[in-house]
Amino acid sequence: MPHFRLRCSLCDRLYSFDTRAWRCTCGAPLDVEVLLQGFTLDFEKLRARENTLWRYRELLPIREQNSIVSLGEGFTPIMVREINGTKVVYKLDFLNPTGSFKDRGASVLISHLNEIGIKEIVEDSSGNAGAAIAAYSKAAGIKCRVFVPAEAPFGKVLQIIVYGAEIIRVPGSRENVNKAALEAAQKSYYAGHLWNPFFIEGLKTISFEVYEQTRGVPDAAILPVGSGGLLLGVHKGFKELREMRLAEKIPRIFGVQTYGFAQAYERLHNKKVKKAEEAILADGIAVPNPPRIDQIVRAVKETGGDIILVSNEEIIEGFKDLASLGLFVEPTSATAQAALNKLIKEKVFERGSTIFVPLTGIGLKATDKIGKYILK
Ligand SMILES: [Zn+2]
């Protein structure tokens, strides 16, 4: 059976699973390392298991079955469409319990905290991750406090409040919010999804599912990059499949960013992007300083991918393309379609290629933005 280790992504220092550290003493993020020790998944055996991401539980870093906090997340449907000679595998991950892919990360993270006996956590996301972590905390009986900017719209925090989390409004910048959360976390546990490696362990299951549902490995994956958790999770999932000798290759990883939040693009291409737009349509990937930027750039380079920048206009076009297929997603999710359109137009993919496009968040979460910027 696989073994798991918690290890610094930069200096290799090892940490105990019981640690409350949310990053290494050197400042770098921690990773969960899976030592397979000859283990491989038997997909025939999986068929009898429940249709959640916990069907892959041997590859998830939770020891006891009764630590698991599940709301039925994962194993979301796929929808395959042919677009200009490429086979596009859409994964309807917005159909997760709280309406976004973040439930994958929240289920594994909260199960881990449940296992090590954490009773109270602190978070600083008012978006999809905040909602997911609030929901799973409630299910686990863990007290959850979420720090949000003072001006965060009620609509955005409503879902978090419904799940019973305590909202603390902090005046000033996003950095102030983070500072206040970290201060409170000294007596609690900081569950910030930008940093937490157990969150990424949950996200990697999307790759196992695509492999199982399509019986193969796509040629490329198109992934919106905010904190980079999805991109790193997908990359890690396929790497583990390859290590188990199930997959022969790893898809080319294409990240998607916007002009206003283009740090990974800038790092990859070694140039500055000036063209920021006033309206932030894709708020889910409006992350100014992703802590795992080095890992993001490495994954993209290693797989022969790229980071694609999309404009609001292109996002709106992508949103409408998805709507014409019958799909109602958040503008952030539509960035993946916008990038797909660009890559197909630039003939980056060979004819007959299979492209994996996860659709990360449901449109119902962003009716205000959709009404304001897309329907007008
Ligand atoms: Zn370190």
Image (tube, rainbow, N blue to C red):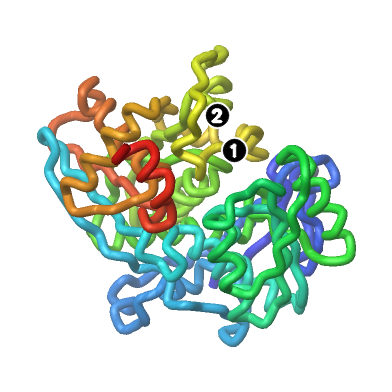
Q: Which residue is mark 2?
A: 261
Q: Is residue 86 left or right of residue 227?
A: left
The quadrant of the rendering that contains the C terminus is top left
- Residue 111 seen in the current view: no
Q: Earlier in the sequence, mark 1 or mark 2?
A: 2
Q: Position of residue 229 (x, y in %)?
A: 54, 48
- Residue 317 seen in the current view: yes
Tell me how far mark 1 sits from mark 2, CA to CA.
Answer: 6 Å
Q: Of all residues shown, which one is farthest toward the bottom?
A: 66
Q: In terms of secondary structure, where does tag 1 sit? A: loop
- Ligand 1: does it lie within 8 Å of the C-beta at label 1? no
Q: Position of residue 256 (x, y in %)?
A: 43, 33
Residue at horizontal 69 percent and vertical 52 percent from the top: 148
What is the three-letter code of the residue carrying label 2? Phe
Q: Given contact means CB atoms under 8 Å apart, are the residues at marks 1 and 2 in contact?
A: yes
Q: Is residue 177 left or right of residue 224?
A: right
Q: Which residue is mark 1?
A: 287
Closest to the observer, 89 or 243: 89
Residue at horizontal 47 percent and vertical 44 percent from the top: 231
Q: In terms of secondary structure, where does tag 2 sit? A: loop
Closest to the observer, 296 or 175: 175
Can you say whether 248 is above or below 65 in the image?
Answer: above
Residue at horizontal 50 percent and vertical 59 percent from the top: 102
Q: Position of residue 84 (x, y in %)?
A: 11, 33
Can you say whether 89 is above or below 348 in the image?
Answer: below
Total numbered labels? 2
